[in-house]
Image (tube, grey):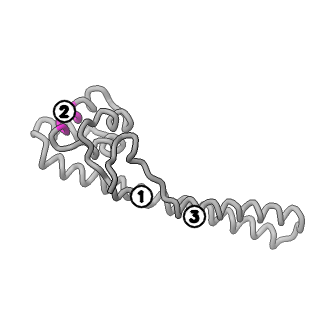
Amino acid sequence: MPEQSAKSHASSDRLFMAIALILVINVIFACVRAFHVRDAYAIYQILVAVAFVILALRVRGYGTKNQDRIIRLEEQVRYARVLPEPILTRSAALTLDQYIGLRFACDTELAALVERTLAENLTRKQIKEAVTTWRPDHFRI
């Protein structure tokens, strides 16, 4: 797998993007057809096309939300193993976004970065930029 960094870790799900594009095109075709035909079935086609777009977005959202929760749990287990007790206790104040950003920090720099995150209220992006030794995550969808 290729090396990851703050600039190169993001990826996109090309299959989802292709399907989303098809669904949006379907909405456009349904609207154009309804404009020309003007019958109840054309309205029904618009509703179904829009419903499919909403469904696709919701399903994608459920998957990423579930991954966020798993990341938080994995990081809490990792913190219990790696962090000294005073920092571990304070780490309970981290937000989900901060947990997600901190997952890229290696074990040796984690304690200092958790303290800095809590002191400066760093954002996910700021945390990723502060990581010096990157811990890759190749499983994110």
Q: Residue furthest front?
A: 2
Residue 100, position as x, y percentages in the image:
33, 46
Left or right: 30 in relation to 81: right
- Mark 3 or mark 1: whose residue is earlier in sequence: 3
Identity, as a three-letter code, of the amino acid under mark 3: Leu
What residue is drawn where x is 24% and y is 29%? 116
The residue labelled by disc 1 is 141
Residues in magenta, as a range? 109-115
The residue labelled by disc 3 is 55
What residue is drawn where x is 48% and y is 59%? 13
The residue labelled by disc 2 is 112
- Quadrant housing residue 18: bottom right
- Quadrant housing residue 49: bottom right
Q: Is residue 126 magenta?
A: no
Structural crowding at the residue carrying mark 1, measured as other residues with C-alpha within 10 Å and reported as few (<14), some (14–19) or many (≥20): few
Identity, as a three-letter code, of the amino acid under mark 2: Ala
What residue is drawn where x is 32% and y is 57%? 1
Structural crowding at the residue carrying mark 2, measured as other residues with C-alpha within 10 Å and reported as few (<14), some (14–19) or many (≥20): few
- Mark 2 or mark 3: whose residue is earlier in sequence: 3
Residue 111, position as x, y percentages in the image:
17, 36
Is the C terminus in the top left, top right, bottom left or bottom right quadrant? bottom left
What residue is drawn where x is 32% and y is 35%? 127
